[in-house]
Amino acid sequence: MPVANCYIKNGKVTQNEVHELASKWAKAIHVDAKDICITFIPDCIQGGQQYKILVNLYLPSLWSEKNIKNMQLSLFTILKNHFQYEKHEIFVITSIVQSGHVLEGGELIEW
C-alpha cells in the first residue's frame, strides 16, 4: 500500500479535499483508493530548508522503478495543481519498504 504523509506549512486541508486528492492519486496510479493512504499534517514547523509541502512517501518494494517514478510524479503533480504551489515549494522523499516490514491489524504483511 502506498502511504504518503504530507506535512503542510501554514495550511489546512478539509476531509473532503483529502478524499478528493486520494481519489485522484489512486486513479493516476491505477489502484483503488482503499489501497492507498494519504495523510496531511497541517501547520508543521520546519527548521532549515523550508517547503510548503514536504512528503514522506512509503512504497512497497514490489513496484517497478517505472511505477515508483509514476507514483512520485503523479502525487507531486496532484499536490502542485491542487494547492497551486511552485515546483520548488514541494519536496517528496521516497522510502522503499521491504516485504515483512509492515504490520497491519497486528498481522505481518508479506508480498
Image (cartoon, grey):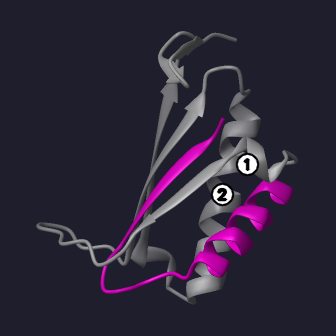
Q: Is residue 63 above or below residue 84?
A: above
User: Does dot 2 land on a helix, a strand or a loop?
Assistant: helix
Displayed quadrant of residue 75: bottom right
- The residue located at (78%, 67%) in the rendering is 24
Q: Position of residue 43 (x, y in %)?
A: 29, 78
In the image, which residues are magenta? 1-28
Amino acid type, mark 2 = Leu
Q: Position of residue 1 (x, y in %)?
A: 66, 35
Q: Is 98 displayed left or right of 22 in the figure?
A: left
Q: Is residue 104 above or below residue 37?
A: above
Amino acid type, mark 1 = Asn
- Label drawn at residue 37: none
- The residue located at (51%, 76%) in the rendering is 87
Mark 1 and mark 2: Cα distance apart in space: 5 Å
Q: Quadrant of the C terminus?
A: top right
Q: Is residue 30 above or below residue 27?
A: above
Q: Are marks 1 and 2 in contact (CB under 8 Å)?
A: yes
Examine the structure image and report whether residue 71 is included in the region drawn in magenta.
Answer: no
Q: Is residue 98 above or below residue 12?
A: above
Q: Is 45 displayed left or right of 32 in the figure?
A: left
- Label drawn at residue 70: 1
Displayed quadrant of residue 88: bottom left
User: Does dot 1 land on a helix, a strand or a loop?
Assistant: helix
Q: Position of residue 103 (x, y in %)?
A: 50, 20
Residue at the disc numbered 2: 73
Crowd class of label 1 (few under 14; some 14 to 19; many from 20; radius 10 Å) = some
- The residue located at (76%, 47%) in the rendering is 34
- The residue located at (84%, 45%) in the rendering is 31
Crowd class of label 2 (few under 14; some 14 to 19; many from 20; radius 10 Å) = some
